[in-house]
Structure formats: structure tokens, C-alpha cells
Image (tube, helix red, strand yellow):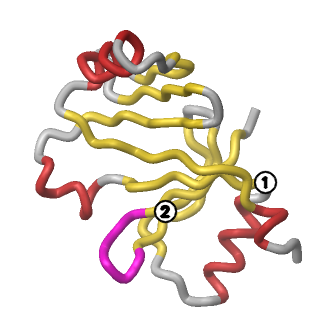
Amino acid sequence: MNSQKELFSHAATVLAVANVGHSLAYYENKLGFTCNFKWNDPMDYAVLKRGDISIHLTNKDNAESVLKNQISIYIFVHDVDAVYHEFSEKNVTIHTPIGDREYQMREFDVIDPDGYIIGFGMNTN
């Protein structure tokens, strides 16, 4: 099996916000980020980038339930099936099983001991 260094690529912080469109405008107009992905109409997810920094914005109606319902960090990997297999063998608690998503990602989520949801995935196109 590949080492973790070979499997993991990069990560993005996922921020739960009251309004993705409003936050997107702030990050673009005030902080100089560029949006390179928007999801749904009305928009409820966006990906921003500036240099090597990537921030994902997601709508969250109730900020108090972020730990139970939202990914806190998303880790991009080179071989998501290998990572899933590795974690399954170690009895990691899987929150969302591995699968191909309609937004061209193959991914799964785990829950850490403190309740944080961590997503792992790779682009399928």
C-alpha cells in the first residue's frame, strides 16, 4: 500500500456560514479570493482560492449543530479507495460511506473522537 505521504494531497477548511452568497462576496471583494466552484441554485456551497489557500463555504442554518452535521476539514487524496480501506481496517468510525457524488467527487467522511466530521475525497473527472 502507498504511504500516507503519497495518498494525501491537500486540505481545505470548510466554514459553515449564514449565507453563502453574502460570505462569497466578502471573500472575493474584501479578501481577494477567487471563486472557482458554486453548487446549487440557490447557491449553498462555494469554493474559494487564493494562492495555495482553499476555503469552502457551506450554508448552515443552525451554527450550534455544526459538529454533528458539517465537515470541518476536507482532505483531498490521490487514492480515496486506498484511504477508505486503510481506515476501515483500523475500525475508524465512518460517518458517510464511500461513493461517487454527482459533483464529480468520490468521497467519504469519518468522525473523530471529539465529533468533528472529516471528509476525504478525490476528483473523478
Left or right placement of residue 13 versus residue 61 in this view = right
- State the residue position of label 2: 109
Left or right placement of residue 29 versus residue 80 in this view = left
Q: Quadrant of the N terminus?
A: bottom right
Examine the rendered structure and indicate whether residue 110 appears above or below residue 102: below
Q: Position of residue 40 (x, y in %)?
A: 38, 21
- State the residue position of label 1: 78
Disc 1 residue type (three-letter): His
Q: Quadrant of the C terminus?
A: top right
> Which comes before the other along the chain, label 2 or label 1?
1
Depth check: 98 or 116 in front? 116
Q: Position of residue 71 (x, y in %)?
A: 39, 54
Mark number, residue 4: none
Q: Say which residue appears at 21% left-offset and 40% top-offset.
A: 60
Q: Position of residue 88 (x, y in %)?
A: 62, 81
Disc 2 residue type (three-letter): Asp
Measured in 3D between alpha carbons, the distance from the residue under mark 2 to the one under mark 1, in whole angstroms, is 16 Å
Examine the rendered structure and indicate whether residue 63 appears above or below residue 32: below
Q: Position of residue 48 (x, y in %)?
A: 49, 26
Q: Nearer the viewer, mark 2 or mark 1?
A: 1
Q: Residue furthest front?
A: 31
Q: Say which residue appears at 16% left-offset and 57% top-offset.
A: 65
Q: Say which residue appears at 41% left-offset and 72% top-offset.
A: 111
Q: Which residues are magenta?
A: 112-117
How many residues crowd mark 2 within 10 Å: few (<14), some (14–19), many (20+)?
A: many
Magenta-drawn stretch contains 61 = no
Examine the rendered structure and indicate whether residue 61 appears above or below residue 93: above
